[in-house]
Amino acid sequence: MPDSSDRLPAAELDAALNPHRAEQQARAREHNLDVLGQRGVLLFGGETDDELADLWSAVDRFESVVEARGGDTLTNAPDSSEPENPEFVLPERRSREPVAEYVRRIRDAAERLTRFERERGAQAEGGGEA
């Protein structure tokens, strides 16, 4: 049986198995920063890679819901002076707001848009007024 002292530490083993991992992670981080910045998301610089991925996922989901409802993410961007529908504007991040809280607010906003559509559809089917 091999001696446990012959094993490489986990970090060294990972580097040996995937020598380009650090470069790939750095590129992914830069890509996430760029995408989120283009969408007007306020970043403070201390966000982890996982937090950036969570933010991007939430923003992407929100934008998908807006587009499914006929909204335009450029017209309804956070820096738009006259959005076509304020509900279609990505919520702004508050000063010193933790990423997890901001992600929750973005997801809640997407859910409100989804729920509104479901309720409106149910009213139309039931003969109620919208």
Image: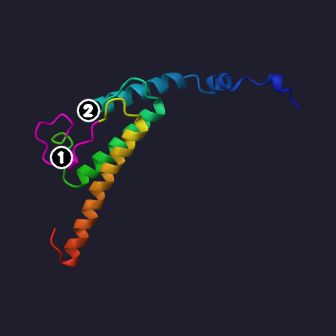
- As for residue 80 lying within the magenta part, the answer is yes
| Residue underneath mark 1 | 86
Instruction: Identify the residue shown where x is 38% and y is 31%.
Output: 32
Asked if 52 appears above or below 88 in the picture, the reply is above
Q: CA distance from mark 2 to mark 1?
A: 15 Å
Residue type pointed to by label 1:
Pro
Dot 2 or dot 1, earlier in sequence? 2
In the rendered image, the vertical position of residue 102 relative to residue 32, given as above or below? below
Amino acid type at circle 2 is Gly
Which is nearer the eye, 20 or 59? 59
| Secondary structure category for the residue under label 2 | loop
Circle number at residue 129:
none
Residue ranking furthest to the bottom:
127
Considering every residue shown, the one lying at the far right of the view is 1
Picture quadrant of residue 72: top left
Residue 127 image point, x, y percent: 18, 78
Rendered view: 66 above or below 120: above
Is 85 one of the magenta-colored residues? yes
Going 48% across and 26% down the picture, which residue do you hit? Answer: 24
Local crowd size for mark 2, using a 10 Å CA cut-off: few (<14), some (14–19), many (≥20): some
At label 1, counting other C-alpha atoms closer than 10 Å, the crowd grade (few under 14, some 14-19, many 20 or more) is few
**Rendered location of residue 115, percent (x, y):** 30, 60
**Image quadrant containing the C terminus:** bottom left
Disc 1 secondary structure class? helix
Query: Which segment did they paint magenta?
Result: 77-92
**Residue at mark 2:** 40
* Position of residue 107 measured from the top left corner of the image (x, y, whole percent): 36, 48
Vertical comparison of 31 with 85: above or below? above
Q: Is residue 92 left or right of residue 76?
A: right
Q: Nearer the viewer, mark 2 or mark 1?
A: 1
* Residue located at (33% from left, 41% from top): 59
Q: Residue furthest left?
A: 82
